[in-house]
Image (cartoon, grey):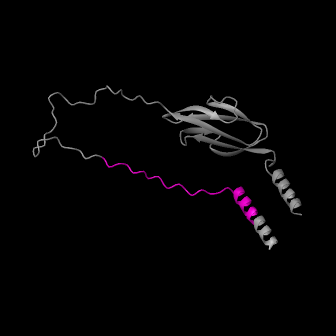
Amino acid sequence: MKSLTFAICLTLAVCTTGFAGGNYAVLMQESPAGAGEIQPGIGVHTFGVNEKVTLNTVPKKGYKFVYWLGDVSDPTANRTTMSVDGPKIVIAVFERDAYNLPSASAAISQGPEGLTPRNDSIGGSFPSIPPDPPDEPDDPDDPPPVPEPGTMILLTSGAFILRKRLFRKQ
């Protein structure tokens, strides 16, 4: 009886997922968050089976578009298409523009000639600037690990079977 109930539940679970009226869900994301705008927008969208969807990205200032992650026709193009033949996840990947940093040999800003550093009249030395206090990390503690539901089910059923065997022998 238990195996029949399990088989019925399994059949219902398989039959009801993925066949929601001929539509599929597509999850759209961007990485890093806030680096650009994507069309049809960030989030979960529902499209019909075999529908062609046009994807477009516009990077924000300071970022450039790199590629699409997911099943798209041209992963390196800002504007591309995908065919919705099942549930999908598509991610637009951006990166920061390169910055031109001054070379190490570049002159540090200097004042006009003849300008000298201030002399401290008490000790005859240049004033010292106290060092900055070290930055303490303010990261929160890692959350405790949470076992997966399948693990909990297996542990519970194992304990139940073990308990049944122990009490049967007595």
User: What residue is at 61 percent from the left and 38 percent from the top?
Assistant: 38
Quarter location, residue 99:
top left
- Count the numbered circles shown: 0
Q: Is residue 5 magenta?
A: no
User: What residue is at 21 percent from the left and 31 percent from the top?
Assistant: 111
Quarter location, residue 77:
top right
On screen, residue 57 versus residue 137, left or right, reads: right
Image position, residue 8 (x, y; %): 87, 57
Is 129 situated above or below 97?
Answer: below
Quadrant housing the N terminus: bottom right
Quarter location, residue 101:
top left
Task: Say which of 146 and 138 sits in front.
Answer: 146
Image position, residue 79 (x, y; %): 64, 30
Extreme residue in the bottom direction:
170
Quadrant housing the C terminus: bottom right
Extreme residue in the front direction:
170
Q: Is residue 154 magenta?
A: yes
On screen, residue 129 versus residue 1, left or right, reads: left
Image position, residue 161 (x, y; %): 78, 65
Task: Say which of 155 and 127 sits in front.
Answer: 155
Is 117 situated above or below 162?
Answer: above
Image position, residue 160 (x, y; %): 76, 66
Q: Which residues are magenta?
A: 132-159
User: What residue is at 30 percent from the left and 47 percent from the top?
Assistant: 132
Task: Say which of 11 and 123 sits in front.
Answer: 123
User: What residue is at 50 percent from the left and 56 percent from the top?
Assistant: 141
* Main secondary structure type of the part rendered in magenta: loop
